[in-house]
Amino acid sequence: MPTPVLPLDALAAQVRDGASVTVQKGDEADVPMALAKALVRRGVRGLHVITLPTAAYPASGMMVDLLIGAGCVESVETSGISLHELGAAPRFTQAVKAGRLKVVDATCPAVYAGLQAGAKGQPFAPLRGLIGSDLLRHRSDYRVIDNPYTPGDRIVVVPAINADVAIFHATRADAEGNVWVGRDRDRLLAAHAANTVLVTVDRVVPGSFFDDPVLGAGVIPAPYVDAIAIVPGGGVPLAADGGVDLAEVRRYQRSAASDEGFAAWLRDEVFAPETALTA
């Protein structure tokens, strides 16, 4: 069966209140900005956002910051949220200072390890590098055990991450619902580890990617994708080639520095009728 193709707001309706959601780091054409705006319009609440492995690139940081500022997010599990070279993510920073957002500290390797365990159906994953760090004082769910093959060799195990929903953008899907992500393995990992996968794409092309041995190597198969929405430019300000419109991110950052400015940005960029129709 081909993957269902839904209107954008219907795709957003698949994300229930209180869901755990993985989002991408934003160095590929992978940030579902239009879907995030649709979630804000829907008024979703109580999300637990897991960043894979960080939201410290301009577009991904902006998207997570938007969801936090709009009141959609209750907690984040992350190794960092910022606007990268542009500086701090303003709504995230304000929410943390005000005590409105729970931050579950993580590291990039720990998030990857948890997702890899989740993708494989394992209860946990071992990794090195955390012993002696402050992180172990803040993460009671990270355990230090003996390597069962070398007694006395201490290692850390982290719990599997199986998010309720993985959301991301891609440049294209085919008529069967296979989603092309190229060499980006993070979106494939997120799809394998999540219970539900929701994707926005710039376009749907005829045929099957698996008919082409070159394209087929960079595909998330349709059985892993629960629904798609066709949203040309759905990652803006992130472009199809991975480039980002820094001027647009700066404009957001200036607006989001104050409650009034952020409210005006939401009104113009999320809730305006022409925006809702095209986003």
Image (tube, grey):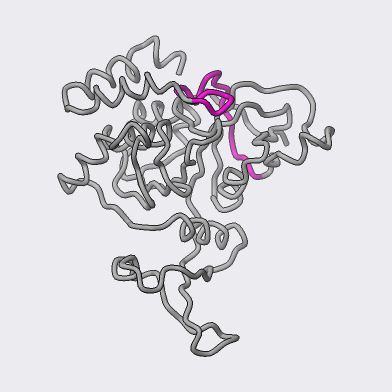
Nearer to me, 249 or 46: 249
Question: Which stretch did the figure color magenta?
Answer: 224-243
Name the residue: 50% across, 23% down: 234
Image point (47%, 72%), residue name: 157
Q: Residue at x 57, y 46 (%)?
A: 186
Horizontal and vertical percent position of residue 227: 59, 34
Q: Is residue 80 magenta?
A: no
Q: Is residue 34 above or below residue 48?
A: above
Point out the image quarter for the C terminus.
top left
* 53 displayed left or right of 176: left
How many numbered callouts?
Answer: 0
- In the rendered image, residue 125, in percent from the top left (x then y), is placed at 53, 68
Q: Residue furthest front?
A: 85
Indicate whether 115 appears above or below 157.
above
Residue 94 at x, y = what percent? Answer: 19, 39
- Relative to residue 202, is residue 52 depicted above or below? below
- x, y percentage for residue 90? 25, 34
Kindly give the residue lying farthest to the bottom in the view shown.
151
Magenta highlight on residue 226: yes
Residue in the picture at 38% in, 58% down: 106
Main SS, magenta residues: loop
Q: Is residue 259 left or right of residue 28?
A: left
Q: Residue furthest top?
A: 274
Residue 276 falls left or right of residue 264: right
* Quadrant position of residue 245: top left
The N terminus lies in quadrant: top right
Is residue 207 left or right of 18 when viewed as pictured? right
